[in-house]
Image: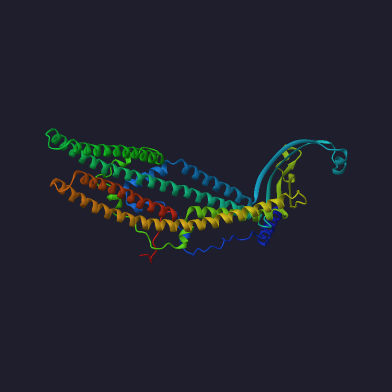
């Protein structure tokens, strides 16, 4: 009973010592011109692409997230960081163990005389429970624990960055496929029109109604559009291959059920609305900013741990067990023994190793802070550029759509005047050619508009969340 009381006293003394110990300094983020807000606690928008209201894109994103090996690797690194954080945190707790031994020893004559032992040789059997605890006097263990936790946060943010980059690439690749599909539809429609015109010209040329020059000009336009079609189909195939790499399978089956006859208008029918201004706290939800802040925090606590490592360490130990020279007497009460104690360890000379470790940790912390501050500045620039690009690309699309409206009306007038004999063949072909070029340009403008939304969502770390005061 006295033994147990003594061990309890040691534990209580350790707890009092721990309460009186100095801990590591608290981490503070570098002062940056970022407004405080609640978005810091918001996770990355996992389904940010829902703003496009496109079921096919939703299925492609789900498949890409399930398949992508980079994301699997990033998730595994998070699991490893979590395990390492748990391992490091265990150093703050007492360590208990069990020891059992049996040996034969031979003592010197002096030892036999001092201990009044009849024989120099004897057997020794023992078993005991061992308890040890390092008192965190200067906060070294707590600093190491905080460093490991920060590494865990950094790994999780890095995984979110991989997720965001992957989903943005899938969205851009899907938009590219849709763009080339639209271009193929436009060119096929024009080529079919030239096929009908050529068929009519060939019949009338045989009948002697049209000169060969007119026939050859129409045939040249047909051949030109056919070449454009083949090049567009090649680009469509390349776009589908790029998308297939991201989703891990051919996207044809996933995309087969969607409506193609309407072109891209289904994707553009309800484009996401963009808020007029972006609060600074949106930057803090970006996974790259979260990762670098966590890296800075880890470096800070690594520096604190290196400083505390230069100071003395205190270890408390205790042992309670049984020791006997005869195995059959090992469990008897007279064989019980215990010991307890405390040890202080202080390095007196190590060639400057620990001092150099502090300098290295301080330099690493300074580098991490510079990287974090630069990333914040870059994030401001990226968000501003994405916001401007979104607005300007929308304006460019509207202008391109107005152009196509005028060109379609021009072609309608030109075709009627040509049939009535008021307009020459070359002028009619030029008008048709301009319409084709304008429709292809409008498809490019639509692609730029959608890609600008993807870039904007990516710049915000996964879209945005409207507050109660948002319009």
Question: Where residue 373 sits in the image (x, y, percent)?
Answer: 55, 58
Name the residue at 54% across, 45% down.
Answer: 80
Q: Which colour style is shown? A: rainbow
Name the residue at 22% across, 39% down.
Answer: 217
How many dots with numbers?
Answer: 0
Quick one: which residue is furthest to the top in this view?
Answer: 206
Question: Where residue 11 sits in the image (x, y, percent)?
Answer: 67, 56
Pick the residue in front: 151 or 435: 435
The answer, for residue 316, to whether it is visible in the render is: no
The answer, for residue 227, to whether it is visible in the render is: yes
Name the residue at 21% across, 51% down.
Answer: 410
Pick the residue in front: 55 or 94: 55
Instruction: Say whether residue 232 is left or right of residue 117.
Output: left
Pick the residue in front: 433 or 36: 433
Question: Where residue 448 sits in the image (x, y, percent)?
Answer: 36, 51
Looking at the picture, does residue 334 appear above or below residue 313? above
Quick one: which residue is furthest to the bottom in this view?
Answer: 469
Quarter of the view holding residue 314: bottom right
Pick the residue in front: 67 or 311: 67
Instruction: Say whether residue 84 is left or right of residue 415.
Output: right
Instruction: Say whether residue 408 is left or right of residue 85.
Output: left
Question: Where residue 119 sits in the image (x, y, percent)?
Answer: 84, 36
Quarter of the figure with the C terminus: bottom left
């Amino acid at each position: 009973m006295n033994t147990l009381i003594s061990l309890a006293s040691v534990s209580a003394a350790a707890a009092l010592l721990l309460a009186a110990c100095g801990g590591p300094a608290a981490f503070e983020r570098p002062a940056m011109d970022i407004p405080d807000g609640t978005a810091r606690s918001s996770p990355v928008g996992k389904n940010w692409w829902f703003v496009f209201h496109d079921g096919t894109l939703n299925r492609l994103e789900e498949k890409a997230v399930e398949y992508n090996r980079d994301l699997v690797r990033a998730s595994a690194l998070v699991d490893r960081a979590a395990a390492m954080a748990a391992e490091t945190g265990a150093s703050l707790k007492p360590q208990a163990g069990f020891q059992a031994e049996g040996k034969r020893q031979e003592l010197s004559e002096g030892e036999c005389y001092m201990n009044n032992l009849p024989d120099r040789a004897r057997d020794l059997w023992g078993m005991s429970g061992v308890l040890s605890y390092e008192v965190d006097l200067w906060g070294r263990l707590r600093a190491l624990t905080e460093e490991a936790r920060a590494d865990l946060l950094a790994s999780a943010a890095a995984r979110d960055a991989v997720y965001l980059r992957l989903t943005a690439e899938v969205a851009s690749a899907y938009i590219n496929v849709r763009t080339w599909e639209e271009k193929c539809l436009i060119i096929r429609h024009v080529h079919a029109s030239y096929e009908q015109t050529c068929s009519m010209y060939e019949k009338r040329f045989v009948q002697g109604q049209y000169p060969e020059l007119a026939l050859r000009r129409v045939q040249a336009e047909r051949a030109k559009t056919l070449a454009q079609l083949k090049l567009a189909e090649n680009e469509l195939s390349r776009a589908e291959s790029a998308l297939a790499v991201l989703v891990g399978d051919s996207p044809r089956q996933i995309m087969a059920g969607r409506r193609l006859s309407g072109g891209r208008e289904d994707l553009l029918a309800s484009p996401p609305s963009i808020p007029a201004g972006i609060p600074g706290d949106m930057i803090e939800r970006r996974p790259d900013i979260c990762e670098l802040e966590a890296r800075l925090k880890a470096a800070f606590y690594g520096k604190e741990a290196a400083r505390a490592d230069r100071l003395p360490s205190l270890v408390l130990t205790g042992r309670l067990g049984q020791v006997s020279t005869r195995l059959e007497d090992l469990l008897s009460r007279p064989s019980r023994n215990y010991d307890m104690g405390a040890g202080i360890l202080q390095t007196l000379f190590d060639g400057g190793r620990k001092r150099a470790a502090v300098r290295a940790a301080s330099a690493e912390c300074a580098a991490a802070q510079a990287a974090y501050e630069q990333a914040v500045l870059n994030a401001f620039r990226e968000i501003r550029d994405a916001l401007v690009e979104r607005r300007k690309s929308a304006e460019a699309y509207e202008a391109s759509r107005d152009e196509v409206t005028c060109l379609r009306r021009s072609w309608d007038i030109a075709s009627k005047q040509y049939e009535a004999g008021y307009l020459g063949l070359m002028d009619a072909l030029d008008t048709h050619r301009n319409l084709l070029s304008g429709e292809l340009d409008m498809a490019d403008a639509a692609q730029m508009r959608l890609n600008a939304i993807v870039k904007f969502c990516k710049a915000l770390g996964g879209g945005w969340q409207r507050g109660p005061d948002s319009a």
